[in-house]
Amino acid sequence: MKKRIGLIIGLLLCTTLLFAQGKFVATASKTNVGVGEQFEVDFTMNGGGTHFSPPDFHDFDVLSGPNMESSFTSVNGVSTMSIGYGFILAAKKEGTFTIDEAAVVLNGHTLTTSPIKIKVKGQAPPQQAQQAQAAAPDDNPKIDTKDLSKQIFVRAVTDKTKAYVGEQIKVYYKIYTRVGILGGQPDKAPDLNGFWNQDVPSKGTVWKSEVYKGIRYNVATVKESMLFPQHAGDLQIDPLAITFMVELRLPSRNVLDDMYGNIKQMKYSSKSQPITIHAMALPAAGKPADFTGAVGNYTVYTDVDKKELKANETLNYTVDISGTGNLNLINSPKITTPVDVEKYDPKTNDHIVVDSNGVSGSRQFSYLLIPRHQGNFTLNPVEFTYFNPSTQKYVTVPTKPFTIKVDKGDAQANVPAFNSSDQQDIKLLGSDIRYIKTSSADVFKNGEGFYDSALYYILLLLGPVLFIGAVFYRRWMTEYNSDIVKVRSREASRMAAKHLAFAQKELTAGNRSAFYDAVAKGLYGYLSDKLNIPVSDLNKENIVTQLEARKLDSTIIKQLVDTMDLCEMARFAPVTGISEQQVFDKAKNTINEIEDKI
Amino acid sequence: MKLKIKYNRLNRGLYLLLMLALPLFSLGDDKVNALFDKANQLYAKAHYPEAVQAYQQILNAGYQSAVVYFNTGNAYYKMDDMPSAILYYEKAHKLAPNDQDISINIQFANLKIADKIEPQPEFFVNRWWHSFILFLPVNKLAGLGVLFFIGGFALLIWYLFTRSYIIKKASFYVGVIAILAGIVFIFMANRQVSYFDGHHQAIVFSNSVIVKGSPDLNAKPLFVIHDGTKVNINQTNQNWIEIELPNGNTGWITIDNVKDI
């Protein structure tokens, strides 16, 4: 006895512990009924509870109940216990009625169900029809498919109805059923025009119990997809159609049916409702130029396999983009390498996982680079830009630059055979207009160009005019110089000037006799040239006769003779009464006067 | 005593040459140079509209220069205004016909306009002749012509007065050759001027112009040309001009569609 009490206490303790998370729901087998039609309302408690108080079914006839049922299940060591109170009701009249909440006390708390609305319209399906069916056994009895559509249907569910282009949308296709399903097959995969579709691999169907619109169904997710809108606009997720083989329990027709049940199998097709997704274009504001359409949340990691190598050897440069989002749609980021480094198209390595959380993983771009010449070069950082839909902002992920040291390589290594010499054509990278000239503006006033200006013509004329002038000048010169006597006479004054200049020098030096000598030489020389008298005949008498013959003033002749006498005398005796300067001036004046007259 | 100072003939010749050469090497005034430098700096900083404005100030002050026209064209090119760029390049080409930079930029600008016109091939003698007379800008040709002409006559004058036989012989031949060269330069300058006078050209500035068969609005349309196309103007009839394309097509358009080079 003691043992039993202990067991009961133990069990009670267990139940209170287990059913701490109690749940109390009300479900109706039908929410649209006709007047007089029977339907079932169940109140189910997960985890016990006491003091069940049913609602007052004043608008309905209670045909049966409360019918208590209890179940105890143990799955993987987790035990659940549920107690249900069932009522079979029939509507009294047309209209919309509410079944009020029921209450139950669990652990001192009062739990209530939510009210259920029941629509009563029209008459109950005639009992005769069912009886006729029962009376006339048929292998394929007519089943009301409209009625079946409440029993089994496919529903598409999305996690959002508004998304940016490239943003991930989850779609579930669920089967809701209240009847037995023997098998089912999708008619065809939905066309998901305008989406990039990534199916989540199925892990087998798991049935769960779910209440939808107040009715309890067995629910299984048959298909789960990740969709990425490809362009802006209202995009439709096509319905999924599934053909089921269902098992229907029909009213029994005879004793055998009563024993084994009248079960019919039939095919039934159901289609989910189409869902419209409003795809928004990515904001244009702040869109970087190098944005290539990556939407989600990413990190970027770059690496090189070596930092020092020889020319013509290969270098692997990897760009690893990991995160969640439209990874499959990410294009290789543009990398800029120095011109002398050969770059090949990247190899793409994907580690992409699709599960019910979305598309995640990494995409690795591996670039093969071959530096062709020695030297240091820098791999510029890759700037990867993505759009983060949760913050609605563009994010540019910086990476680090790499400096690569290239040593002199073997001349022939990795170089194709036909490239026998090390010479290369200069690569033309682009073309542009020639730059402005900055040295000098080189301006001139309009209409003031040198050509056609007055100066131009004057200068053009200058040459010939000068030349003609020169020709005439030369002709005159030839004539002028042809008479030796005249030339000598013209040259006379120059000779005299020379002697007089010498005399002047002697005078300042105080060399008296040399001074007079020079003055005399100047005078005689001058007269010999001027009057064309040979040096052998050069004497005072001759000079005077010649001068008189040329009708020279007698005073000048007298002055000349005086000066000559003075010079001759001064060579032998000191001169008094006249200074050397006066002699010099006198000689100079005389020559000038003769020059003027003759 | 009057002493005659003999004129040094050689010195006189040198002074003369210097006097001739000076106008050729003279620079514009400081204000122009300052504006020019400012415009170049604006261009270097990619402020193209402001650079154009500064260049235009030089031109509006009544100056012309191949360099300024060329730079203005470049600024318009960078502003993607091809008709204006071509107009200024062609103005520059007229002042400096043998400048490679100008010719290359004209080619670049012509690649960016709507009309692609294959020019009629020129007879090779004509081509040679044109490249000969366009070898140097007209003012340089005129200056060189004058220099050679005067230099040649100076040598001939020297020939008249020198006594050395070798110098006499050398100066005679060199002088005659210099005079001939001077004549050739002057002739080239003359031909170049008449070439540009005879080739009255303009750039189309309207987006699309229908070329008519006669100077009349209701005349038959012949073909359509677009902005940036260079046309030769054959004749003028009130406000209509007869244009000729490099491929030989001719027709009439109104004068407000084009700007003269």
Image (cartoon, rainbow, N blue to C red):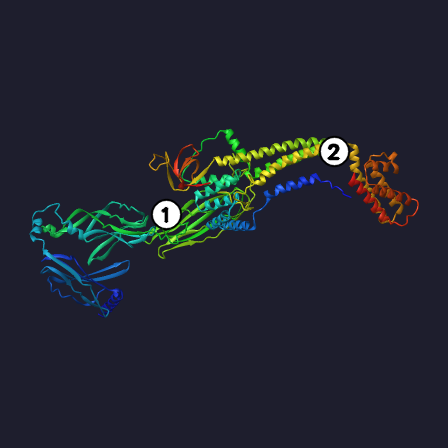
Q: Which residue is mark 1?
A: A329
Mark 2: give few (<14), some (14-19) or many (20+) Cα within 10 Å: few
Q: Looking at the rendered structure, which numbered label has been put on residue A480?
A: 2
Q: Depth check: A198 or A70 in front? A: A198
Q: Position of residue A544 (x, y in %)?
A: 86, 38
Judged from the image, the secondary structure of the residue bearing numbered disc 2 is helix
**Quarter occupied by the N terminus of chain A:** bottom left
Task: Determine if residue B202 is in view.
Answer: yes
Q: Position of residue B219 (x, y in %)?
A: 34, 35
Q: In the figure, B78 relative to A89: above or below?
A: above
Q: Position of residue B171 (x, y in %)?
A: 68, 33
- Sequence order check, earlier mark of 1 and 2: 1
User: Which mark is nearer the camera, 1 or 2?
Assistant: 2
The tally of labels here is: 2
Judged from the image, the secondary structure of the residue bearing numbered disc 1 is helix
> How far is the residue under mark 1 from the one under mark 2?
107 Å
The amino acid at mark 2 is Tyr
Q: In the figure, A167 relative to A427: above or below?
A: below
- Chain identifier of the residue bearing label 1 in the image: A
Task: Determine if residue A431 is in view.
Answer: no
Q: Looking at the rendered structure, which numbered label has been put on residue A590?
A: none
- A208 with respect to A290 (left or right): left
The amino acid at mark 1 is Leu
Discs 1, 2 touching: Cβ within 8 Å: no
- Chain identifier of the residue bearing label 2 in the image: A
